[in-house]
Amino acid sequence: MEHSFTKETERWGVFEISCPGKKEGNPFTDYAIEGCFKSKNEIVCVDGFYDGEGVYKVRFMPSFEDRYSFEIKGSFSEKTFAGEFAAGPPRKGNHGPLRVANSFHFAYEDGTPYYSIGTTCYVWELQHDDLQKQTLETLKNSAFNKIRFCIFPKHYDYNLKEPRSYPYEGTPMDSSVLTKENFLDYMGKTEGNNWDFKRFNLEHFRHIESCIQKLCAIGIEADLIVMHPYDRWGFSRMNAECDDLYWNYVIARFSAYRNVWWSLANEYDLFPDKNMADWERYASIICRKDKYNHLRSIHNYRPFYDYSRPWITHCSIQRQEVYKSAEYVTEWRERYKKPVVLDEIAYEGNIQHGWGNISGKELTRRFWEAFCRGGYAGHGETFTNSRDILWWSHGGELHGESPERFKFLKKILEKIPGHGLTPITASWDEVACCVEYPGARPGYYLFYYSFMRPSFRDYYFDDDNEWSVDVIDTWEMIIDPKGNFKGKFRIELPGKEYIAVRIQRRN
């Protein structure tokens, strides 16, 4: 077998080379493979990975429209493999990987603004095929442009069934002993499992990368939760050598996909056997091995990680108290000087857990509050049903009231000039923000009144410019144009909750 590869790809696409190599021993640990890619604009060297049956693969994401040459070598083979390919223009919808923009916001590499409206479906990709298809269809028709999900299966309430696959070769504990009453007794248990943590189950990883590709095709970022503590299989309690092997393998397989984000962990502070040195070590592996500098963060249960750490690109936050969440965005922006993403601010639903039974109105309010404070909020849904299929973990269909409101919000965000909103000082009963213009007075303002209900509001910016005003009912999804105004002016409001006012300079 000779090495095989396609002769061309698109900029920010995935170029893949398959090479024959050694099968003796354990190819996951005994041999190495590296690919170096050169063009007149860049030189990038990345690790490859073993993909079974004596086949090794290297993946590369070209950052330029250019001709590339490559060389593949390593202990996996006595031969060196070489060739050339062309990276052409990106196809429609391909804007490249996401980057931090203007300190607090995001944009694709081609400069297109990105306003994160994320959702959480922890193990949607480990459900049966029909449910996965339904999830992808739901996502395609939603406002969501980011989804958080795990590489490892999850053990928790409503998650007692076995996943479709496991990340390692071996066998799991007997799950017939699990009930809704005793599931917590098995959290973190390792007894009864028989895994080889040095041999990956290739079908598990092939399936996940297939899901990453499908998400990319519909414009959704894959926020990969690489580790988590909700575990009865022992994956959260591997030793350092096996952890590092896992991290290197995941990065080699997935980092060439432009829509990948790295979340080191969900609720890092709940791991019984990991310490800060471990998390910093994993971060150093990402920074060395991910040559594309995908977005990186880590998620808390109670205490925040130190988001000022230089390897962290953005804050991935779970609220720390019952009542306030998005209200702290302004403070966190000032503290960390990075984008603030509220990946968990409680979920719309009606389950018994306090984090999963807020109303659609309250979740929508938290989204608007976060955006108007210059941050980003995340969605989840946890409604009880007879099949115990909850969007927050399994995907499927959405039943709540908030997703339609996020579509409305997304349309408003997409019309904002520039990259992101900047919070400004305003009256104590309103949340206000603007779009800053270099060297000029802001020309776009948004005022949000949350659960306040003013019947009118007076505004004044200057005597010279004319301003257009829209009153926005964020719950009923109605935009009411009020006309154009100059100097000091009064806007009549409906005297109800969840009203915003958008004011834009006309000249």
Image: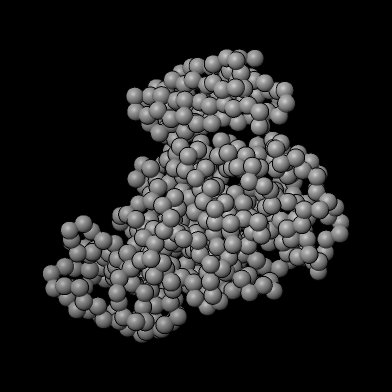
Would residue 209 appear left or right of 53 to someone viewing this image?
A: left
- Tag count: 0
Q: Residue at x 46, y 70 (%)?
A: 326
Q: Depth check: give the residue in front, 156 or 482.
A: 156
Residue 81 x/y as whole percent: 54, 17
Would residue 186 appear left or right of 494 to someone viewing this image?
A: right
Q: Residue at x 82, y 64 (%)?
A: 179
Q: Depth check: give the residue in front, 448 or 38.
A: 38
Please determine whether, in this image, residue 465 is positioned above or below residue 200: below
Would residue 269 appear left or right of 114 to someone viewing this image?
A: right
Please determine whether, in this image, residue 400 is positioned above or below residue 449: above
Would residue 221 appear left or right of 274 to someone viewing this image?
A: left
Quadrant where the C terminus is found in the figure: bottom left
When asked about the image quadrant of residue 185, the answer is bottom right
Please determine whether, in this image, residue 2 is positioned above or below residue 319: above
Residue 181 shows in this picture: yes
* Colour scheme: one colour
When asked about the image quadrant of residue 402, the answer is bottom right
When asked about the image quadrant of residue 241, the answer is top right
Q: Depth check: give the residue in front, 103 or 352.
A: 103
